[in-house]
Amino acid sequence: MVIVMQAHASEPEVAALIAKIESLGFTAHVSAGSERTIVGVIGDERPIEPVVFEAFPGVERVVRILAPYKLASREFHPADRVIALPNGVRLGGGQDVVVMAGPCAVESQEQLEAAAEAVHAAGVRVLRGGAFKPRTSPYSFQGLGEKGLLLLREVADRYGMAVITEVITPEDVPMVAEHAEILQIGARNMQNYKLLRAVGDADRPVVLKRGLGSTVDELLQAAEYILARGNDRVALCERGIRTFETATRFTLDINAVPVLKHATSLPVVVDPSHATGRAEFVRPVALAAVASGADGLLVEVHPNPPEALSDGAQSLTPAAFAHLMGDVGRVADAVGRGADGTDA
Amino acid sequence: MVIVMQAHASEPEVAALIAKIESLGFTAHVSAGSERTIVGVIGDERPIEPVVFEAFPGVERVVRILAPYKLASREFHPADRVIALPNGVRLGGGQDVVVMAGPCAVESQEQLEAAAEAVHAAGVRVLRGGAFKPRTSPYSFQGLGEKGLLLLREVADRYGMAVITEVITPEDVPMVAEHAEILQIGARNMQNYKLLRAVGDADRPVVLKRGLGSTVDELLQAAEYILARGNDRVALCERGIRTFETATRFTLDINAVPVLKHATSLPVVVDPSHATGRAEFVRPVALAAVASGADGLLVEVHPNPPEALSDGAQSLTPAAFAHLMGDVGRVADAVGRGADGTDA
Amino acid sequence: MVIVMQAHASEPEVAALIAKIESLGFTAHVSAGSERTIVGVIGDERPIEPVVFEAFPGVERVVRILAPYKLASREFHPADRVIALPNGVRLGGGQDVVVMAGPCAVESQEQLEAAAEAVHAAGVRVLRGGAFKPRTSPYSFQGLGEKGLLLLREVADRYGMAVITEVITPEDVPMVAEHAEILQIGARNMQNYKLLRAVGDADRPVVLKRGLGSTVDELLQAAEYILARGNDRVALCERGIRTFETATRFTLDINAVPVLKHATSLPVVVDPSHATGRAEFVRPVALAAVASGADGLLVEVHPNPPEALSDGAQSLTPAAFAHLMGDVGRVADAVGRGADGTDA
Amino acid sequence: MVIVMQAHASEPEVAALIAKIESLGFTAHVSAGSERTIVGVIGDERPIEPVVFEAFPGVERVVRILAPYKLASREFHPADRVIALPNGVRLGGGQDVVVMAGPCAVESQEQLEAAAEAVHAAGVRVLRGGAFKPRTSPYSFQGLGEKGLLLLREVADRYGMAVITEVITPEDVPMVAEHAEILQIGARNMQNYKLLRAVGDADRPVVLKRGLGSTVDELLQAAEYILARGNDRVALCERGIRTFETATRFTLDINAVPVLKHATSLPVVVDPSHATGRAEFVRPVALAAVASGADGLLVEVHPNPPEALSDGAQSLTPAAFAHLMGDVGRVADAVGRGADGTDA
């Protein structure tokens, strides 16, 4: 870290700060500029926070030099990481773009069956579907729970698909892990640390969604919680952030794709359905994600969107989804990779 | 709700929509404008979401007429609600402004004792302190856990103070409720619905903090989760939101105080410590909160901020806090109310 | 518009509102819901603002039904508009993607020459370069002024390229129009209405950049100022908005591309250089823009970025740019269109 | 500045950077940390931008040490600055809080007369009113122009009030300065640098409004443009920023008041009318501003808000304004200062 002292910081203030730095096992390096004294903290600063020094008298500002995460950084693990699923799907590392698709919420055997058939026909090998649904309103449909998980498993097995589904509370992790190949942490739970630790202890890959008010740095720190428990099969998902723009439900931070690729070797996934909130915008934004280097997509598909119990407005029909898959294949090809399940 | 059809929506599209509206038990009211047909949904729309209609062919946009919460609304409960604590403190309803103060995290017996003594001497009757700390980095101090709760209880009892402390997971609710008069839900957990239901089932008042990326409407919907379980002793806490401004840690949404007062009769609390992130800005912002009509404040005080294990930069010293309390009393008086524990 | 009355709005309040509506030449349509009375305003609401009714006693909220712009809307002009330049370049309407490239600021004959040669060699037919530079700090390089325009013209002519350059004040419009085929309005001037009217009166196409704190609706209203003066050769440019994310200079709102395509038939351009602020992220984000349907790109290229007087960090080298152009061609091809100047 | 090199930056890269630093007249100070080399730039960095170094090979990040403005900083001018008007009003420096009030737009002799009479009766000595109105839609009322200025002057003179009014284009500055004691720069023009230079050359105090997407740092850099021309009578106005919250028109950044007070000695003014957009929220937010240390307020008052041609929803009636003034006096008193024109 670099600590900028106030213009008129006194020598005793600098001395007290140096003592603190050294008491934490770091070396202090003082540099007197023309208008400010700057104190460098030499050592691995990652485990400490700037706030440790900010409260010292005479300190104006503390600037991190290293990212606040380690295991998640590309510096620590330069080579792209690849998440391999039992059914042969490989996510990350310049492999084919993996499209994970299915309904927002599992509603019934019929609905799930129809959705699964459609996405499978379009080439998809990872079925998404929510059994536990965190909903803004207590009066909204909250999912079928474990019954939904059983349906997902049964239908996915019939098509040889892997399952990705959300887990929302630590004690459910073992049960969800029993039925799904990939555990999804939703945006609202990105900083639910007990849950992060629980999936960190599970023997399952995790797709960690970025909180809608969270920075890329915070997303990587959340991933660090999982990695620190020994689970390094983590993919990061950009799904739109909160901004002042109201024309779409959220604003997809497309910059985040290359930013993440630069900062980490973990796979990066994009969810164009939540990021836009409207089916008509899913296709162009999904293609943008692929062109920007995303390793995977999470797409909502419903056999009959107007009757969806959740997120119908952003769900693609089977026909629209099939059309999208063709485009995904072509754009993936244009940027030098294929799309899982397509022949493009 | 009001449903705006697209310019060229067909008659069958309007008919299908009307059928859907009626199937949900509402009445449809069609109004043909000069350029758009508008369909009104007559009935209590609160339990349904606009998305139910957005996916219908021919629909351009759906606009809510009523707020998406009911129990939390002032319309449902016009009179200000007052939360009464066993030690006589009363929060809300134009009563004295209640200042809840103490350290960010409980670190040790000595630290807590010193902080408690200081805030008590300044007139405070509700001691704050964190035993379970959700932290952005897995390498940061995560709190003393139950040991911290025991310390809080013991010290608070010595001074006749009530305790407010954060609970971060549903299964901890009974234990925390045993030691604390008020359960705090942190910003990161505002949409942790299982946790909201758990505190909704507890026999304790709740201070619910606004998520840093959450709207006022979403805060009120989160409160609705708690109220819907039968616990109506909920106070709402504005603690700063994420914006593009980086001069402070967050941006205190001072507008939210009167907006909440207008929308709900639940008490409103402001946390100037987290909202600014810097001790030197806490006083002016705390006074602003009181002037704007806040019923309470949550203020971080540490006997020795440079040695704090968490949030030292935003913690007031005992001397600065005592000074603040005097000002709070005077501003509270200027807007026609007192401050709990002061003689102003 | 739809006007939602407060729960307890009185009959005289409704009557006064209706009188106002009718005095403005509209018809009022009253609908009594179960909990609110709603008053529809029938007629072309575009020229009026909701605020006209918001101040009336008893009014809770006013909701627009139609977009607040008319000439700029796709509803008014359904067919895609194409801007044709004298040198044969055609922007918009599903034509080839047009890449406009060159240095951020014109610095010298040599610098411009080198940049122009490089972008021309890569296939570019529209040269960008700033002669008048609005800069955040008064101490930064503010551009060469008219001398820069003369250089642009001379160099562009040598390569048969058209010129796009920014105009920052109304009185400069005629002079700039003399030297450039396209007038650019910068993000900071998106709501400089006198300037918008001035370019509306000029016989030149305009690229209007979105303000960094402006919504898509406001961008379209700004375009409406230009269209209302009779100049309908306007392209809209997404160049990143202000959000809480600090990993990049701005956040490219990729959603805005399809949103704009839906709302208007004007061509849409994306500036990946300003939107990211870092050269290493320009390529993935530029390709994302093409995949999402953008009609053109504005890319900064400098022969020697470390020596640039402005925006060096986001400028591509000639080699990186040439590489980008190949990719742009392939992605454009994948989404069914070509890229101007490439053979892909 | 502090320049952080990439982990594997080479010696020649560091050497090239040092050469650049020295060529600009600075001294370089190299510090080899455990994982990064850091290069300090010693000298007055204010006139240069980080971007000058960001494009160098091997550079990871550049961090400013000093604020990017000088004349506007409290460090340069520690003592609070006071703007004295001919009629005895003094703004800033712990003087009485100055309330500037009047209609958003001057509409007619009668309207202005009624507004002026009301605000004067409540103690106001600075009349606000817009003659040139920048409006989002080209179809909205754009102000009476010079005729409005003449009305303002005439009515203000009758009451011994000073006039504050907006100027929107450089060539109008002399004319507006002839009729008004204070020139206002609107939020949309905060970065209209030609206009800033023009008011910098005028012999009139300036109230500079913060752009709705601008940081506090950018506001101070905009002020620097005016100060650099020799006009040091500049007050800064917080009027709400763009955030994701839609319950109010903008989000008042109350933190900005103490942040500005810390960073600069220029007076700070708050506009609660634009910051909230609704009359019912103006009072609490205005009082918050006073409690937080604002030196002045800009408040919209209209004799008949429902008939206002602009911003009626946020305009106070004369009665509501008189009530506000009493409260402002009391809160100002509570924080140790008076309110201009009140006896509190």
Image (cartoon, coloured by chain):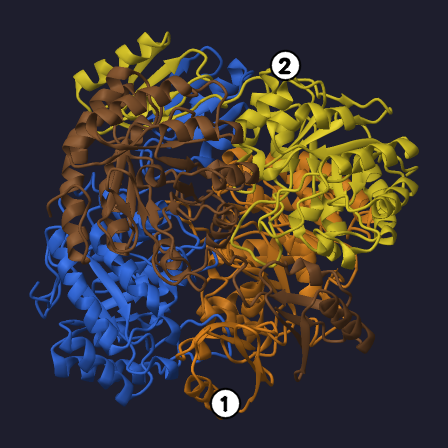
Chain colours: A yellow, B brown, C orange, D blue
In the image, residue C206 sits, relative to residue B147, either above or below, namely below
Q: Nearer the viewer, residue D121 or D188?
A: D121
Q: Nearer the viewer, residue D108 or A126?
A: A126
| Image position, residue C282 (x, y; %) | 63, 40
In the image, residue A259 sits, relative to residue D218, either above or below, namely above
Report the disc number at residue B305: none
Is there a contact, CB below 8 Å, between mark 2 and mark 1?
A: no
The residue under the point 62% across, 55% down is A248
Residue B239 found in image quarter: top left
Task: Indicate left or right for A37 with A126 as reference.
Answer: left
Identify the amino acid type marked 2: Gly
Residue that label 1 marks: C24
Q: Nearer the viewer, residue A172 or B25?
A: B25
The residue under the point 64% across, 34% down is A258
Task: Indicate left or right for D290 with A108 as reference.
Answer: left
Dot 1, how many residues are within 10 Å of its Cα: few (below 14), some (14-19), or many (20+)? few
Dot 2, how many residues are within 10 Å of its Cα: few (below 14), some (14-19), or many (20+)? some
| Image position, residue D269 (x, y; %) | 25, 58
| Image position, residue D48 (x, y; %) | 38, 37
Identify the amino acid type marked 1: Leu
The residue under the point 79% across, 74% down is B15
Respond whether the residues carrying marks 2 and 1 are from the same subunit: no
**SS type, badge 1:** loop
Q: Please give the chain letter of the residue carrying mark 1.
A: C
Q: Nearer the viewer, residue A324 or A122?
A: A122
In the image, residue D234 sits, relative to residue C331, either above or below, namely below
Residue that label 2 marks: A230
